[in-house]
């Protein structure tokens, strides 16, 4: 057997092994990061670039960012963004076609500013788009590959790996969308009760570990049945959606809002003691008092709510007990004045 044939066979064996490893990762994991990491590592093992990266498309901002970057310049690339269309990677993202540039100095598309920032010297670039049917999800970029050993076979192999990466990203996003559907309430867009208990378990664990407090506000709309009886269930659903939006608008980014069921809502305030939580509860109560809903439907519906507040760990130490305490306080208000706040261990607010 000639030396060339031996090298070819070794190359084929390496390709088969890499395909096997990538396929195994794809079928055994839904963790996008670990799949992409495997694909990128295998790519480096085969092509031996000086540095390589995976740029993802941020569709909202029409930019590319470095999701994975390996090599001496990786740290400098963490916060770098390219406009779609800028540089060779930007061109590939925009046009959805592979670009192989043996000498970047002869290519006007090359963005010199990246080299200036990273103190890197780019000689050659291979950029391949990660395509999903109608759009480009990202770009894989290999810098300074030995172009003397990059022929049609290598090009085919690279394209195959990029197709794998695109499938992985599509699958992960599909799973993410399905998970969102299973934890989100259709009517209000808030999280649902199933997700509430999962989130509370995480919050109890975190708060116990770091010595944090957190507070739950249980909200039940007053006389909501009258709205359904008077205006029908479609208006009732529209009203719940608008109230869900109002609740969310009063919260911080770290807070959670859930539709518990029917006309009941729960707000979870992490790292928040009782007095701070009362500020939020009063704000919610006052917003409801002054708001008119379903204006687009030609109505001006005003709704009030009975609320209950309980704090971990002072009032309860388990997810179910925190909810139960807040629920009991809400019922205390419901059975007396309505349109007010009940506070665990303090009673109804004066």
Image (cartoon, rainbow, N blue to C red):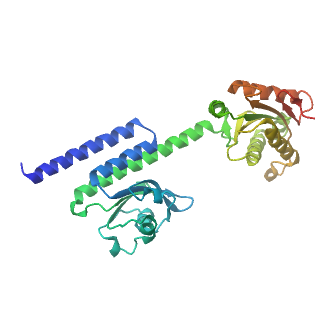
From the viewer's side, name the closer residue of 68 and 181. Answer: 68
Q: In the rendered image of this protein, does residue 237 appear above or below residue 64?
A: above
How far across and how far down the image is residue 347, in percent? 88, 28
Report the quarter where the C terminus lies.
Answer: top right
* Number of numbered discs on residues: 0
Answer above or below: position of 57 versus 210. Answer: below
Is 140 placed left or right of 305 in the picture? left
Asked where in the image residue 110 lies, by quadrant, the reply is bottom left
Residue beneath the point at 45% across and 44% down: 32
- For residue 135, side relative to residue 296 (left or right): left
Looking at the image, residue 163 sits to the left or right of residue 253; the answer is: left
**Residue at 44% across, 66% down:** 114
Locate residue 215, reporting x and y percent. 75, 35
Q: Residue at x 76, y 38 (%)?
A: 233
The x and y percentages for residue 212 are 69, 35
Residue 277 sits above or below residue 332 on the image: below
Residue 47 occupies quadrant: bottom left
């Amino acid at each position: 057997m000639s030396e060339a044939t031996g090298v070819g066979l070794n190359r084929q064996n390496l390709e088969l092994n890499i395909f096997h490893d990538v396929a195994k990762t794809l079928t055994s994991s839904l963790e996008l990061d670990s799949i992409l990491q495997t694909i990128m590592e295998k790519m480096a093992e085969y092509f031996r670039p000086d540095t390589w990266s995976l740029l993802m498309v941020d569709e909202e901002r029409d930019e590319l960012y470095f999701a994975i970057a390996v090599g001496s310049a990786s740290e400098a690339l963490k916060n770098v963004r390219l406009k779609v269309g800028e540089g060779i990677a930007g061109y590939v993202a925009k046009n959805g076609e592979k670009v192989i540039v043996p000498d970047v100095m002869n290519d006007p598309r090359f963005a010199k500013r990246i080299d200036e920032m990273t103190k890197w010297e780019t000689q050659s670039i291979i950029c391949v788009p990660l395509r999903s049917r109608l759009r480009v999800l990202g770009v894989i970029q290999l810098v300074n590959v030995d172009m003397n050993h990059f022929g049609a076979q290598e090009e085919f192999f690279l394209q195959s790996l990029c197709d794998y990466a695109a499938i992985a990203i599509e699958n992960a996003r599909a799973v993410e969308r399905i998970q969102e559907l299973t934890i989100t309430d259709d009517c209000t867009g808030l999280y649902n009760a199933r997700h509430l208990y999962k989130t509370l378990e995480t919050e109890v664990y975190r708060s116990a570990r770091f010595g944090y407090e957190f507070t739950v506000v249980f909200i039940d709309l007053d006389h909501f049945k009258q709205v359904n009886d008077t205006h029908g269930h479609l208006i009732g659903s529209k009203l719940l959606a608008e109230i869900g939006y109002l609740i969310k608008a009063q919260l911080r980014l770290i807070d959670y809002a859930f539709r518990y069921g029917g006309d009941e809502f729960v707000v979870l305030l992490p790292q928040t003691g009782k007095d701070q939580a009362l500020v939020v509860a009063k704000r919610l109560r006052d917003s409801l008092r002054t708001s008119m809903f379903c204006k687009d439907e030609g109505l001006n519906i005003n709704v009030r709510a009975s609320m209950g507040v309980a704090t971990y760990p002072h009032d309860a130490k388990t997810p179910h007990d925190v909810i139960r305490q807040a629920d009991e306080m809400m019922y205390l208000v419901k059975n007396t004045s309505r349109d007010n706040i009940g506070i665990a261990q303090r009673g109804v607010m004066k």
